[in-house]
Image (spheres, grey):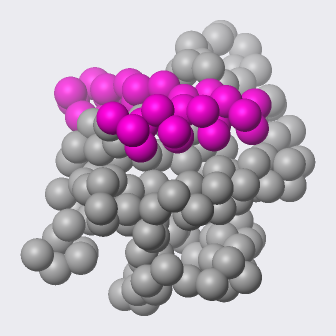
């Protein structure tokens, strides 16, 4: 299977969020969430460091394939991986997908989001990821379904 097809298939699997909030924030009449989101968007460095730490620690356990558009990097050097993450955080790349082929799982990070999505994580990987996320003071939970029954 071509890697792009594999990524598409993984995005159809069960998803979990690695988030600054413990669950989806309900909408309030005064839209305060957007003011809070704006604050966190303007103060992202700590959050970006936490996501980088999770990915680097995970890299110690699993092989990673980093996919940005049509560029594929197998097990990049740590310095290269951190540069790629910084470029995504800065908006130079719109997204970065990190495939863990041996687990049939993937992490996906989109520029500007205050969360990272983990697709098709289960068993040992799910447990390890939950521990790493918790150690960074973030939250790990099943992604809610939208109104169309999709994640």
Say which of 138 and 90 sits in front.
138
Residue 110 in sight in this render: no
Q: Residue at x 38, y 65 (%)?
A: 99
What segment is highlighted magenta in the picture? 123-151
Quadrant holding the N terminus: bottom left
Residue 71 against residue 29 in the figure, above or below: below
Name the outermost residue toward the left: 1
Q: Residue at x 62, y 20 (%)?
A: 22
Q: Residue at x 26, y 56 (%)?
A: 104
Q: Quadrant of residue 25?
A: top right
Q: Quadrant of residue 133?
A: top right
The percent coordinates of residue 112 (x first, y second) are 65, 56
The percent coordinates of residue 9 (x first, y second) are 18, 57
Quadrant holding the C terminus: top left
Say which of 133 and 10 sits in front.
133
Q: Left of 13 or right of it: where is 18?
A: right
Q: Quadrant of residue 78?
A: bottom right
Say which of 83 and 104 sits in front.
104
The percent coordinates of residue 92 (x first, y second) are 66, 79
Q: Residue at x 32, y 28 (%)?
A: 146
Q: Left of 109 or right of it: where is 85?
A: right
Residue 30 against residue 93 in the figure, above or below: above
Say which of 48 and 27 sits in front.
48
Residue 150 in sight in this render: yes
The percent coordinates of residue 100 (x first, y second) are 37, 62
Question: Magenta includes 89?
Answer: no
């Amino acid at each position: 299977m071509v890697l792009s097809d594999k990524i598409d298939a993984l995005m159809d699997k069960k998803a979990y969020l690695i988030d600054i909030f413990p669950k989806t924030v309900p909408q309030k009449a005064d839209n305060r969430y957007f003011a809070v989101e704006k604050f966190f968007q303007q103060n992202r460095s700590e959050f970006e460091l936490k996501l980088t730490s999770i990915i680097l620690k995970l890299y110690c356990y699993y092989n990673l394939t980093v996919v940005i558009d049509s560029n594929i990097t197998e097990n990049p050097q740590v310095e290269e991986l951190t540069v790629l993450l910084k470029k995504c955080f800065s908006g130079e790349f719109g997204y970065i997908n990190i495939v863990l082929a041996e687990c049939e799982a993937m992490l996906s990070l989109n520029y500007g989001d205050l969360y990272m999505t983990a697709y098709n994580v289960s068993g040992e990987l799910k447990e390890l990821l939950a521990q790493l996320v918790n150690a960074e003071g973030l939250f790990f939970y099943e992604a809610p379904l939208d109104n169309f029954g999709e994640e």
